[in-house]
Amino acid sequence: MFTVRLPHILGFLLLVTGLCDAQTSSQRAIEPLLQFDVPVRHESRPYGNSAELANTALRTPRIGLVLSGGAARGVAQVGVLRALEEANIRPDFIAGTSIGSIIGGLYAGGYDANRLQNSVNAVDWSHVLQLSDEADRSALVVDQKPVSDRSILTVRFDGLLPVLPQAVSNGQRLTNMLNELALQGYYQSTNFDSLGIPFRAVATDLVSGERVIIGSGSLAEAMRSSSTIPVMYAAVPRDSMLLVDGGLVSNLPVDVALAHGCDLVIAINTSSPLSQRWEIRDPFETLDQVFSVMMKDNLERQRSLADFVIEPILHDYSGNDFDKADSLIEIGYRMGKQWVQAIRDSIDARMLRSLPRPDDDVRRLYRVQISGLNDDVNPEIGKKQTLDDAYRLAVALQRRENIRRVNVAIFADSLVLLQADSCSRITAVHIHGNTLLSDRDVAGIEARWRNACCNADNRRGLAEYILHDYRRMGYSLARIDSMRMSEGDVHVHLNEGHIDRILVHGNEKTDRVVILRELQLPEGEVFQISALRRWMANLASLNLFHYVTFDIEQSDRETTLILRVIERPSQMLQTAILVDDERNAQLGVVIRDANFFGTGTELAASFFSGDKNRQYVLRYSTNKLFYTPFSLSLMGYYGFKDYNNYREVTGLPDHRFEREVSSIYRSIKTGALASFGLYVQRFGSLLGTIRYEHQRLRTDQVLRTDPEMIDEENHIVALSLSSTIDTKDRYPYPRTGIFFTAEYTSAQTSFGSEIPFSRLFSTYELFIPAFGQNLIVHPRFVFGYGDKTMPQGEEFRIGGLHSFIGMRENEFNGRQIAVGSIALRYHMPFSILFDTYLSLRYDIGRTWKNPELVRIEDLRHGAGLIVGLDTPIGPADFAIGKSFYFLRNKPTNPVRWGPTNLYFSIGVELN
């Protein structure tokens, strides 16, 4: 039996063996000649996933973006970036100089073109680039504002040696702006390779004259270093270097991009061309021309290294035209649109050249099949195509949002198989560590991203979307520690940006407490940019530091805020001058130590003098007493001031009146006072004051018979309560704000005063812009009341250019006062050497000796015209005014007119 069946069994085994060999040969016949994954451009993106890269040996062309300087002209770069974004051309590396470092640094930090445009428009460039070291008036406490207003020249001393500044301005406003913008970016790191896009800023070392490429540290400081115009703004210290504008040595650093491995370089050049001779009209234009000459040769060399040089046509724009940002951006956008197709084609060509090819590919035609997609991708599918066409299709598939990976397989029978793997979908978003986003915010995030493809671009988009909500609320240090996906659920782990430690570096003299008490952000709290903004403004108001910046050091364990300061000498000499039609020339001098023993307190001795007035003051003050919010001021003083007594001139026609000087008396005051109070933020104060004063009134000249002439001598001990609010945006010629002060004074014999009296005084001023900032409406009200025992040395006075136009200085005095005023001030469209203002003013008011004498018909009126110039030594006002009043029961001559008075005042108010 077995013998019979053995041949059959052997035959069957041979048949099976043959079939297996045939199947193996068939499988070998359909193995691809070449197989690879199309490279994707997510390698350097945060929140990407390296597992998506099946073949890391292949990569897309590395695109470098190089941004030149050009000041305001560089704003056009934002428009070019918008055009590149629309074409989905995104750089892998950015290098920038000057304004290009600012645009590029913010772009690398997570800003897109639209957000850049909004930021450029939101900046008050005239304020940021202002050539002044003075703190913003709004940052000063009420007591500091008059001191700041009155100083026109400040010289600082180190011991007995004067210290000359390195530049016209320390550039602190620019530093503050860049710090804020950098903090509001989505990506923050002291390693610029870890930003959203790797970035380098180019600066110049003043010490060695060499180019410096900055790739680490503070992003804001790197941008500030690269954009610092020497002489105008102070150099930025870094190690042993002093860094200024990189445009001095490399205004278009194409070679930096090439050195960092870029295969294709796009350069955007907004440099200023050389000016014509007639265009060089002032020192700043001369300085700009010098820089342009220095850059010229290097600029041409760098242009030749770039693959594409985009140069917006900006002939009609200068480096100062920041107010034309929208027009500049639109010009850049239109120019960028003209280049994007050529750039796109070049990228694609390089991409195709980088893909592997079969050894026997000699212009063969291939059949293309696609696996993994249900839609009709290309009507040409099924037709024979070149390998380049097949590769273009593969690249196009890879760029689709719903595709995770495209595998290319090339077979011997001229078949190209494209295997497209779809990405998974986001089914839910879970945010861990959130305490600040509302339920509505979280629901909006999930609704926006649910069912989105979970690829690297969308993970990045989701992260930026979440961080945008935090940045909108001012939480600038919020970051995403990790993001992971599990079966469609995306888990986002947040760090909301708590400050664990605060360190201060560079304060050699100033006590650390003086600095930290200005920060309203305790350790352990979530960081908010508004707190930092107030801190920086408060520190600037101390006038103790030449340079203030900060670093944020983040680790897995803690976040540290490091404030870095460079102290300025605290001893200073300040001067001011005033020349007017009443008191001729007056000079004021103040010697101050603004950081007495490093405690942030101030000791000052001041002196001002003219022919008719003089004052000596010694003052010690602190805005914060010890660790409390209370202020303290101690002051001793001596001074005198001459006043004219006036009387009516008789024998004039009924329609005219005039007042003449009858006598001149001198008011001499010697005293001391102590004030204790509380500041209301930066704009207000509540003070209690005790004053001891010896007053003496002495008649020096008797020109005519004067029955009201009285000599007095009193010892006054008085208590006062006062409140002041000052929100004026600037001095002189405020555009917005209010000024209000009210004071009640009581002197009693029980206090030790020789004469008892009570006194109430109040002033209210309001500045209202109309039709933009050119026309300002300025109402003013003054009220004062004193009892019958109030001595003459405490009386109220009106008259003069700034008090009551049409009257002479202090023409009326009394124990009661009421004045109302309305002024219209217009900023002229032309300048008479300096910014010029034209004002029309109407005043109404009067003083009275006693309350029972107050009558409406006694009110005096004044009207006048004032031309004001905003000069470097203070306001220069020139005016003409006339006073008048109305008569009752005089129908033929109801108005009596006073003389026409001319006024001038040049300089700042000294008392």
Image (cartoon, rainbow, N blue to C red):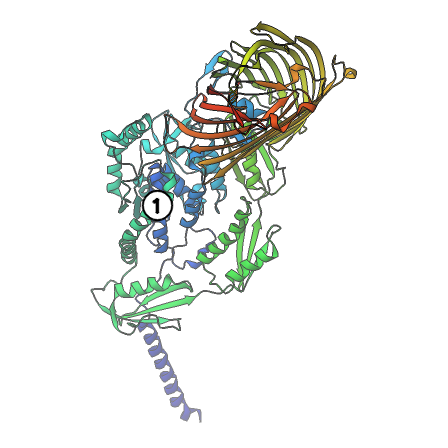
Query: At 66% across and 12% down in the image, what residue appears?
Result: 671
From the viewer's side, name the closer residue of 315 and 180: 315
Residue 150 in the figure: left or right of residue 308: right
From the viewer's side, name the closer residue of 616 and 877: 877
Residue 782, placed above or below residue 92: above
Name the residue carrying label 1: 327
Query: At 48% across and 45% down in the image, what residue appears?
Result: 185
Residue found at the far front of this picture: 892
Residue 331 in the figure: left or right of residue 458: left
From the viewer's side, name the closer residue of 233 and 48: 233
Q: Position of residue 433 (x, y in %)?
A: 60, 51
Residue 317, placed above or below residue 354: above
From the viewer's side, name the closer residue of 21 and 713: 713
Q: Position of residue 797 (x, y in %)?
A: 60, 20
Q: Considering the image in quadrants, where does the C terminus appear?
A: top right
In the rendered picture of this protein, how many numbered marks are placed on residues?
1
Q: Considering the image in quadrants, where does the N terminus appear?
A: bottom left
